[in-house]
Image (spheres, helix red, strand yellow):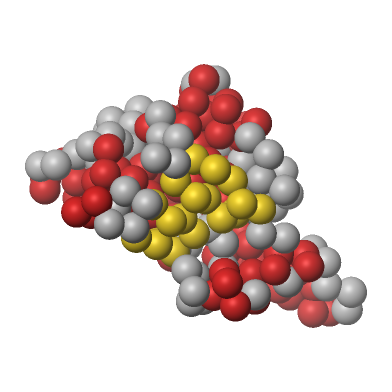
Amino acid sequence: MSIDFYAWDTPNGRKISVALEEMGLPYTVHPVNIGQGRQFEPSFLKISPNNRIPAIVDSDGPGGRPVSIFESGAILLYLGEKTGQFLPQPLQERIPVLEWLMFQMGGFGPMPGQVHHFLTVKDDAARAYGLKRYSDETRRLYGVMDRRLSVSEFFAGALSVADFAMLGWAWRHARHQVDLADFPNVKRWYDTLMARPGVMRGFEITLT
């Protein structure tokens, strides 16, 4: 059975398309045009109560029953549990996956997202203040990531759903005005992941 995948071509959408491809799960894309406000339609609200993409509906959920899941981090954890891939079972090994996944959800996503927003603000004073504030914090987060990746090939040791979460936002590094050459360990990690066939398929699939 195929997973119904509701998404748009955004960092959070790409996290899930990459994970689905890497895990070898069949899925059907249902584009949700957020530029036209389609995320506010009642039918989408039923599966995503926060009116945000991505969301999935798995007809073969726990106990063979359909289940819908919203929030990209929750979807990644569910898919890891479902397949037994990229999410280790031993708690000691799972802890760093959860740590870095929460790091992405709480910081490396909201902060560069604010950079994207303030780049479009017309008022010069408002744009300058917001852009500096969130650009500085985004670069600080890249520094945290770079230090981690100086001692670990991937964020949690082995390749995990935390890497897929990070990759969705690192993919937009140019848009949030970060040169990966300034963060060589992040660049090494990014280039390694982007060369993987599953990741390439995850970025090639049309989400619009």
Residue at figure coordinates x 83%, y 66% from the top left: 120
Return the x and y of residue 181 as percentages of the image width and height.
63, 32
Return the x and y of residue 77 as percentages of the image width and height.
31, 51
Return the x and y of residue 191 as percentages of the image width and height.
55, 25
101 shown above or below 164: below
Horizontally, is 49 left or right of 11 in the view? Answer: left
Report the front residue among 6 and 16: 6
Report the front residue among 112 and 25: 25
Q: Quadrant of residue 179?
A: top right
Return the x and y of residue 158 as percentages of the image width and height.
28, 31
Horizontally, is 205 left or right of 104 in the view? Answer: right
Horizontally, is 89 left or right of 131 in the view? Answer: left
Q: Assign the N terminus to one quadrant of the image.
A: top left
Total numbered labels: 0
Residue at figure coordinates x 61%, y 52% from the top left: 30
Residue at figure coordinates x 19%, y 46% from the top left: 94
Residue at figure coordinates x 44%, y 46% from the top left: 3
**Residue 4 appears in view:** yes
Report the front residue among 18 and 66: 66
**Residue 96 appears in view:** no
Q: Quadrant of residue 2?
A: top left
143 shown above or below 110: above
